Image (tube, rainbow, N blue to C red):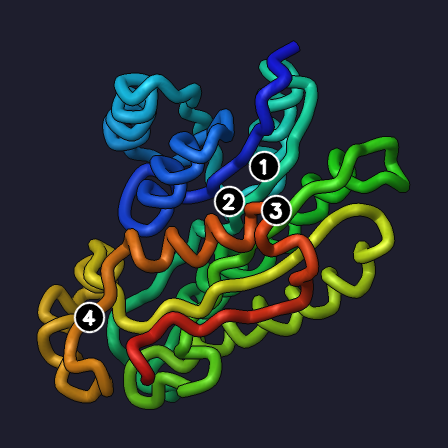
Amino acid sequence: MNEARVLLVTGGSRGIGAEIALGAAVAGWSVAVNYASDAQAADAVVRRIEAGGGKAFAVKADIAAEGAIMDMFAEIDRRHGRLDGLVNNAGVVDVKARVDEMSLARIERMMRINVIGTILCAREAVKRMSTRHGGKGGSIVNISSVASVLGSAGEYVDYAASKGAVDTFTVGLAREVAEEGIRVNAVRPGTIDTEIHASGGQPDRVERVSGSIPMKREGKASEIAAAVLWFLSEQASYATGSILTVSGGR
């Protein structure tokens, strides 16, 4: 079995997830790059890691589906027989809407991916990392959002609520597994220049809101990745249940 530390990054084929995967590989992790549908993008991240001398592989799984999540972890077991880190990065937004305009299908999709998927991935990671289950410990980092404290009124309150759930889950799980060798933390990005805004029907959102940010600029995916990589590292060995906001002061 490969003895390198193994990290799973959900939604690792683009944006913040891709930057986390690339940075983790430089730090010596063997990275499982999860993607939902864009195999080409995931393969491109893997190739970049391998070109730099790192180790990675792409693994397909829709984080909205428990069966797909189980298959993904089974593939990691087959390849490595261990898991040392998880970054719950996969998430979705939707088009700008008031709550009184939201459909049940929209809300269910939001919660299934952003909340239920995050919890299920953490469940499977704990089964592999926890000393209670024979593991050697590990680190989980959940990607939240500054929306969880701002509320995102008039845009996507459902998204903000899903990230509020991630915050609460982070604190609760951290305390639950603190004696089992697992640290659980979260990073709350602010407005970051990635494709997620376009996927939510607002390709101009970064430009539109940057003036309201105290630092007067959007963040970069690499700046969020740096915070995540710190939580994954031994430099953060006494940090658990912590939520770090990286939002330019917003």
User: Residue drawn 32% across and 83% down?
Assistant: 249
User: Residue drawn 50% across and 30% down?
Assistant: 29
- Front-lying residue, 34 or 25: 25
Cα–Cα span, label 2 and label 1: 6 Å
Disc nearer the start of the sequence (4/2): 2
Residue picked out by circle 4: 218
Tell me the quadrant of the picture where the C terminus can be found. Answer: bottom left
Disc nearer the start of the sequence (2/1): 2
Tag 2: residue type?
Answer: Ile
Query: Are there few (<14), some (14-19), or many (20+) residues within 10 Å of tag 1?
Result: some
Tag 4: residue type?
Answer: Glu
- Seen in the picture, residue 59 relative to 118 is either above or below; the reply is above
Tag 3: residue type?
Answer: Glu
User: Residue drawn 86% across and 39% down?
Assistant: 131
Query: Are there few (<14), some (14-19), or many (20+) residues within 10 Å of tag 3?
Result: few
Q: Position of residue 98 (x, y in %)?
A: 32, 86
From the image, state whether disc 4 or disc 2 is nearer to you: 4
Residue picked out by circle 1: 69
Residue picked out by circle 2: 63
